[in-house]
Amino acid sequence: MDSIKITYHIRENKVLKYSIIGILSLILGLISGISSLFPLWLPFFCLGILVLLFIVLAQLVSINQLIMFSFMGMLFFLPFQELPQWDLGVFTLKLSQFFLFLILIISIIRLLLRFKDGKVYYIKTPVDLPILFFALSTIAACYYSTYLNSSLRMIIVLLLLFVAYQVTYHLLDDKEKINKAINIILLSSSTVSLYGIHQYLMHFLGKGGRVWFYSSALGDLIPKIESVSNPNQFSNYLLVCIPLTITMLFYEKKGFKKTILITVTLINLLALMLTYSRGAILGLFSALAVLFIYQKTKIMKLIKIVLFTLLLVWILNFLVNWHSLNIRIASIFDLASEANQERITLHKTALTMLAEHPIIGVGIGNFRFLFSLERPIDIHNTLLQIWVENGTIGLIFFIWILERFFRNMVKALKITKDIYWRGIILGITASAVGIFVQSVTEYILYAMHVWVLLGIGLAVCRVSSTTDKQYIKSNLLK
């Protein structure tokens, strides 16, 4: 029996490797053909190099290592939303999606190879049922869709995000992989933050630099950090990292690692402040509130967290244009400001559409075009836009997803005694609260980092509730 198993695995690996090489070679050929038609050849050339790299890796490393390499690549490039990207017509391909496609290609081939041997099985996750019903409600909402092509594109993107959640949940099946995933996210966030801060400083010094501008209540154009994605989306991504590093900091005992965590926290917090995102600032304080509520340790650790937060605020008082930041925060409550007036108009229009199609909505991806073809814009409120586009049924299923996620996280917080796991669970819970508080002012349904965070959080709950010998192994890595 052992010799049969060994023979089977050798055959499977050979077929899988040659299949990967064939598919990636085809992709490289298509990219080469496309790049010869367009002057923007550099992004395609870079993607071609990545494909060649994977062809080489497919020969040098095991399939399991290739899958994990692709997964870590996906995690690292999560915040890279605008650099680089490729317009494929149906949707814009980002690097994180490219790595997700690689995982899908390998996994589908492997499942087909194993189908005859009856080795295909599926491990349920806590939010499978609500995600399924939410997906069905999204498809049903196409019935009233005026812009059907837009709806179909958004459905494809949403399905990819569901896959990203599933891949994250199933691949992170032990402590070592979870540690690697968190370290990659922290490395990526600090890298992108440093790049954005550098661009901001170059602009401040009059040496160029890529920045965004917003109009203050006084009519001044004030620069804010751009980095490699929209400032609001970037600040939402940073809310994944900041609460997590703070909790890891106060559970970490080694001095060198504490220094690294403090540095990463300072860099990410400075970058978040420079986005001037009002929703992100509210999300950050909400996340810190969660840390205060659930921190069930000695009172000195609570005092340390408070003092550490106050120290960061004091440092930022000298590093950023604090007067502009104060004006930006104050504008949250100024209903007469231009930005708030625009959002009030968006909300009124959304409620009018909702009154016409309250059950299944106007169709996913339709609001922005129904509001204005000349200047398509989202509502800047995730729950309201889901309600308008997916209807009341879709909103109920989305809230069900959130309820199942937070129920599992809170339950894990109550029963977990291990200090390490408790810190990670608390950090992820606080991050999720911060993200969804900001979602009141931003549309984040299609943000891959949100679905990846759901996968990481629930994977941590699963692994922390078992012993080392009882970890549930994912079908993707067996």
Image: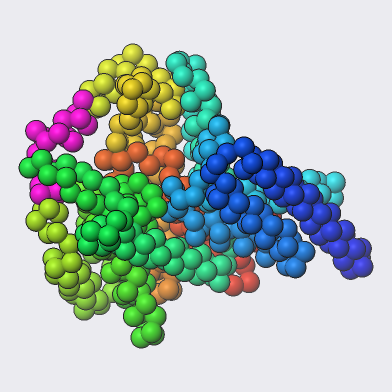
Residue 59 in picture, x, y percent from top left: 77, 64
Where's residue 385, x and y in %?
34, 30
Q: Is residue 162 visible?
A: no
Q: How many marks?
A: 0
Q: Is residue 436 above or below residue 426?
A: above
Q: Is residue 38 magenta?
A: no
Q: Quadrant of the C terminus?
A: bottom right
**Magenta stretch secondary structure, dominant:** helix
Q: Residue placed at 54% from the left, 55% from the top?
A: 74
* Residue visible at 77% across and 53% down in the picture: 21
Which residue: 69% across, 48% down?
Answer: 28
Please report the bounds of the magenta region as a residue range: 327-345
Work out whether residue 46 or residue 303 is closer to the camera in this orientation and state it: 46
Q: Using the rendered image of the protein, determine whether residue 323 is visible from the camera's viewpoint.
A: yes
Does 195 appear above or below 20?
below
Q: Quadrant of residue 294?
A: bottom left
In screen coordinates, is 321 left or right of 255? left
* Residue at the top extreme, as displayed: 356
Residue 182 spot, x, y in % from top left? 46, 66
> In the rendered image of this protein, does residue 127 appear above or below residue 322?
above
Q: Could you tell me which residue is drawn at 31 percent across and 75 percent down?
A: 262
**Whole-percent x and y of residue 446?**
44, 40
